[in-house]
Amino acid sequence: MRHAPALPGSGHAAAKTPGWSGSLCDVSFGPGAIPGATGTPGEIDYRLARRSLISEYKKGRLAQHEVCDAHPELVRNARECSEPSRILCPICEAAKLVLVTYVFGPRLPASGRCITSKDEMRKLAARPGEFACYVVEVCPDCAWNHLARTFVLTPARTA
Ligand SMILES: [Zn+2]
């Protein structure tokens, strides 16, 4: 049941990394499982999967420890280098969710890099090569985590 999403350009580097890869693997399907999304660079949305997970939890079919299993590293990144959103955690309803962005690509660590500012993202976008971005929502309080979206950062195609 544990599939790592295919990481364009970096093989399955993230899946092998002891870092926070557990969280990546915890999504129930990869981008390839979404109709029409295969091979299409662009933004992929995971709201449907998220909604069904939350509803399974609310119905009592999933225990809290099954949905609130963010890797400590991911929670640390959420606390220390990412900005809280305005969305309330769907599980504990006590804290605001934090969106943590990881980027994988050429000349980046195999475990990906946690992006902390729009400026950093702009600099990456200006570099040659394709970068796969994973945005994960994390609750710093209860450790709920879910892949929010993935997208591919392509170099500016200006001549
Ligand atoms: Zn929470």
Image (tube, helix red, strand yellow):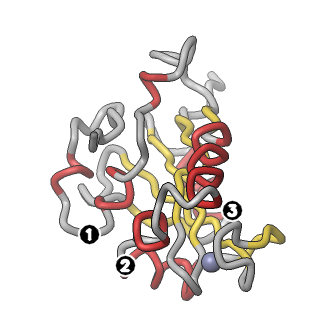
- The residue depicted at 57 percent of the width and 51 percent of the height is 56
- The residue depicted at 41 percent of the width and 33 percent of the height is 30
Neighbours of disc 3 within 10 Å: few (<14), some (14-19), many (20+)? few
Query: Quarter-wise, where is residue 35 in the image?
Result: top right
Under mark 1, the amino acid is: Gly
User: Label 3: which residue?
Assistant: 118
The quadrant of the picture showing ligand 1 is bottom right
Q: Quadrant of the C terminus?
A: top right
Nearer to us of marks 3 and 2 is 2
User: Label 2: which residue?
Assistant: 73
Nearer to us of marks 1 and 3 is 1
Q: CA distance from mark 2 to mark 1?
A: 7 Å
Under mark 3, the amino acid is: Lys
Neighbours of disc 2 within 10 Å: few (<14), some (14-19), many (20+)? few
The residue furthest front is 60
User: Label 1: which residue?
Assistant: 19
